[in-house]
Image (tube, rainbow, N blue to C red):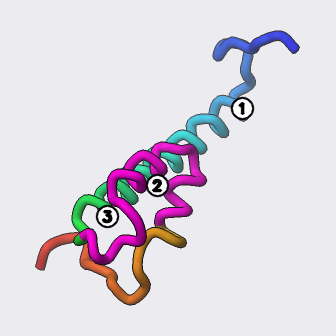
Amino acid sequence: MAKKRWSDLSDGEKAAILVAASVQLSLAATAWVDLARRPAEQVRGAKGAWAVAIAVNFVGPLSYFAFGRIKGSSQPVLPA
């Protein structure tokens, strides 16, 4: 299968790629901010390992939100 260039993609394919990239970057940024603000005792495992795992497309941030945080220890996103 030949590699497609950006200019070879349809408008719909370009839009889908941009939406997926935006979702991925938003998830990763949100997870990294949460990880940075959350005390180590409220994170399952090493914070450094989670920081690396979050970089894995979609799976990393979703895994962090599902398994990396200790339940019942939510924090406000903005300081009060």
Q: Amino acid at mark 2?
A: Leu
In the image, taking residue 32 as reference, residue 59 lies left or right, namely right
Front of the two marks 3 and 1: 3
| Mark 2 crowd level (few <14, some 14–19, many ≥20, 10 Å Cα) | many
Residue reaching furthest to the right: 1
Residue designated by label 1: 13
Q: Nearer the viewer, residue 78 or 72?
A: 72
Note whether 37 is above or below 6 in the view shown. Answer: below
Q: Picture coordinates of residue 10 (x, y %)?
A: 74, 24
Q: Amino acid at mark 3?
A: Asp
In the image, taking residue 14 as reference, residue 68 lies left or right, namely left
Quarter location, residue 16: top right
Which quadrant, please, contains the C terminus?
A: bottom left
Which quadrant, please, contains the N terminus?
A: top right
Label 1: element kind: helix
Front of the two marks 2 and 3: 3
The residue range painted magenta reads: 40-64
Q: Is most of the magenta stretch helix, strand or loop?
A: helix
Residue reaching furthest to the front: 45
Quarter location, residue 19: top right
| Mark 3 crowd level (few <14, some 14–19, many ≥20, 10 Å Cα) | some
Quarter location, residue 13: top right
Q: CA distance from mark 2 to mark 3?
A: 11 Å
Is mark 2 in CB contact (under 8 Å) with mark 1? no
The disc, 2 or 3, on the residue closer to the chain's N-terminal end is: 2
Checking the image for residue 27, the label placed there is: 2
The disc, 2 or 1, on the residue closer to the chain's N-terminal end is: 1
